[in-house]
Image: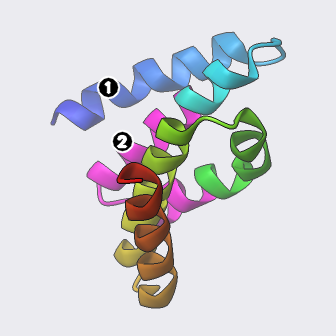
């Protein structure tokens, strides 16, 4: 259960970054935790993580991070049966990743 082993480390990283000024690193750590939630079949938790940090992610203006974010969001939405939203996130991911 590698994702299960990694999750406490991601949570510790976010705790260490709390209140800090490195918004990019907090956003990356949030993405990592959301990806781990997806791997652990906890899409609701993944989607909540991503939704809570969406505005900060958009402020970063990093295409690769945005692509990874959208892929994680698409996986979480499909795990919840939100097919239309999953398709939209997946389509945006493909546009960013391959353009």
Precedes in sequence: disc 2 or disc 1:
1
Q: Residues within 10 Å of mark 2 (few under 14, many from 20)?
A: many
Confirm whether residue 38 shows in the render.
Answer: yes
Residue 46, position as x, y percentages in the image = 49, 55
Q: Which residue is mark 1?
A: 6
Residue 3, position as x, y percentages in the image = 26, 36
What label does residue 47 carry, if any? Answer: none
Residue 65, position as x, y percentages in the image = 52, 38
Task: Tell me: 97 left or right of 69.
Answer: left
- Residue drawn at x 47%, y 38% is 64
The verdict on residue 12 being magenta is no
Say if mark 2 contacts mark 1, CB within 8 Å: yes
The Cα atoms of the two marked residues, 2 and 1, are separated by 8 Å
Q: Secondary structure at mark 1?
A: helix
Q: Secondary structure at mark 2?
A: helix
80, 97: nearer the viewer = 97
Q: Residue extending furthest left? A: 1
- Residue drawn at x 54%, y 17% is 12
**Residue 94, placed above or below residue 30:** below
Principal secondary structure, stretch drawn in magenta: helix
**Residue 26, placed above or below residue 16:** below
90, 22: nearer the viewer = 90
Q: Quadrant of the N terminus?
A: top left
- Residue drawn at x 47%, y 54% is 96
What label does residue 36 carry, if any? Answer: 2
Q: Which region is colored magenta? A: 29-48
Q: Residues within 10 Å of mark 1 (few under 14, many from 20)?
A: few
Task: Tell me: 86 left or right of 13.
Answer: left
**Residue 42, placed above or below residue 7:** below
- Residue drawn at x 77%, y 40% is 56
Confirm whether residue 76 shows in the render.
Answer: no
Residue 28, position as x, y percentages in the image = 55, 29
């Amino acid at each position: 259960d590698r994702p299960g082993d990694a999750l406490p480390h991601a949570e510790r990283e976010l705790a260490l970054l709390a209140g800090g000024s490195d918004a990019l690193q907090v956003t990356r750590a949030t993405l990592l935790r959301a990806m781990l939630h997806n791997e652990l079949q906890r899409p609701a938790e993944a989607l909540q993580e991503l939704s809570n940090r969406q505005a900060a992610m958009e402020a970063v203006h990093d295409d690769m991070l945005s692509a990874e974010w959208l892929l994680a969001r698409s996986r979480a939405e499909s795990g919840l049966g939100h097919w239309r939203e999953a398709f939209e996130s997946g389509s945006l991911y493909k546009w960013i990743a391959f353009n």
